[in-house]
């Protein structure tokens, strides 16, 4: 399957940041999307109704530091 960049769209939180090309966005609005406990990133390939969901974890320095203290 080849992707058609013109059909792609990307949202960070409720803010669309890409629709076939990068969009002019208010950086402060998109940065606020990353400030909460959960971040929603939605990518549309523009190829139909199928969907998938991915759940990730906190990989910030603080999280890694806390988990490095565990012993087995």
Image (spheres, helix red, strand yellow):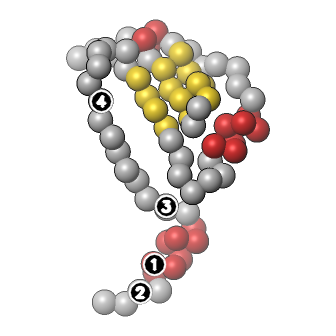
- Circle on res. 33: none
> Left or right: where does residue 2 sit relative to residue 16?
left
Q: Position of residue 56 (x, y in %)?
A: 40, 53
Residue occupying image coordinates x 47% and y 86%: 69
Mark 3 surroundings: few (<14), some (14-19) or many (≥20) residues within 10 A: few
Mark 2 surroundings: few (<14), some (14-19) or many (≥20) residues within 10 A: few
Residue 47 appears in which quarter of the rendering? top left
Disc 4 target residue: 51
Q: CA distance from mark 3 to mark 2?
A: 16 Å
Residue occupying image coordinates x 69% and y 44%: 32
Picture layout, residue 41 above or below residue 63: above
Q: Position of residue 70 (x, y in %)?
A: 41, 86
Asked if the residue under mark 1 is in contact with the one under mark 2, i.e. CB atoms within 8 Å, the reply is yes
Disc 3 target residue: 58
Asked if the residue under mark 4 is in contact with the one under mark 1, i.e. CB atoms within 8 Å, the reply is no
Q: Nearer the viewer, residue 63 or 50?
A: 50
Q: CA distance from mark 2 to mark 1?
A: 6 Å
- Circle on res. 70: 2
């Amino acid at each position: 399957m080849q992707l058609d960049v013109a059909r792609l769209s990307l949202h960070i939180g409720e803010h669309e940041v890409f629709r076939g090309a990068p969009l002019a966005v208010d950086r402060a609005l998109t940065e606020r999307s990353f400030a909460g406990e959960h971040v929603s990133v939605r990518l549309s390939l523009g190829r139909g109704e199928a969907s998938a969901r991915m759940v990730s974890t906190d990989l910030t320095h603080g999280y890694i530091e806390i988990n490095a203290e565990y012993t087995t």
